[in-house]
Image (tube, rainbow, N blue to C red):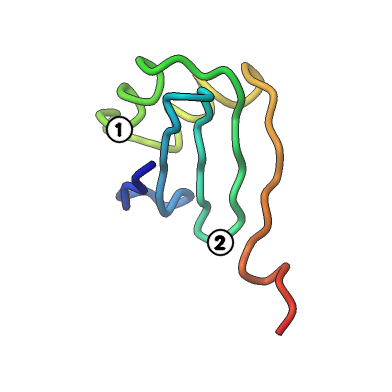
Amino acid sequence: MQWHVIQSTRLAAIAYDRNKPLLYLKFRDRTIYSYSEVPGPVFEALLRAPSKGQYFNEHTRGHFAYQRRASRQDKSG
């Protein structure tokens, strides 16, 4: 799985695990969320979208189950 650093005011990077299929979104505040059962074309379209945040809001948020992952701030030490 490879992280792609992207240009967005809300998102910092995205990654996709084709074997699961899981979409990972890292926000500017370093919080990471994974979205389940996201089809590959949704990930590809997100990479190409002129506004990543707008595409996320319209095609990902509220459409797929998600889980908050640990962020750097959540880890002690």
Q: Which mark is residue 47?
A: 1
Residue type at mark 1 is Leu
Residue type at mark 2 is Arg
From the image, tell me which residue sits under label 2: 30
Q: Is residue 76 above or below residue 71?
A: below
Residue at the (70%, 45%) spot, across then down:
68
**Percent position of residue 29, x then y:** 57, 62
Q: Residues within 10 Å of mark 1 (few under 14, many from 20)?
A: some
Residue at the (34%, 35%) spot, across then down:
51
**Percent position of residue 26, x then y:** 51, 51
**Percent position of residue 53, x then y:** 45, 37
Q: Quadrant of the C terminus?
A: bottom right
Q: Is residue 59 above or below residue 48?
A: above
Residue at the (31%, 24%) spot, across then down:
44
Q: Residues within 10 Å of mark 2 (few under 14, many from 20)?
A: some
Residue at the (51%, 23%) spot, across then down:
21
Residue 32 shown left or right of residue 25 in the figure: right
The residues bearing labels 1 and 2 have C-alpha atoms spaced at a distance of: 19 Å
Q: Nearer the viewer, residue 53 or 16?
A: 16
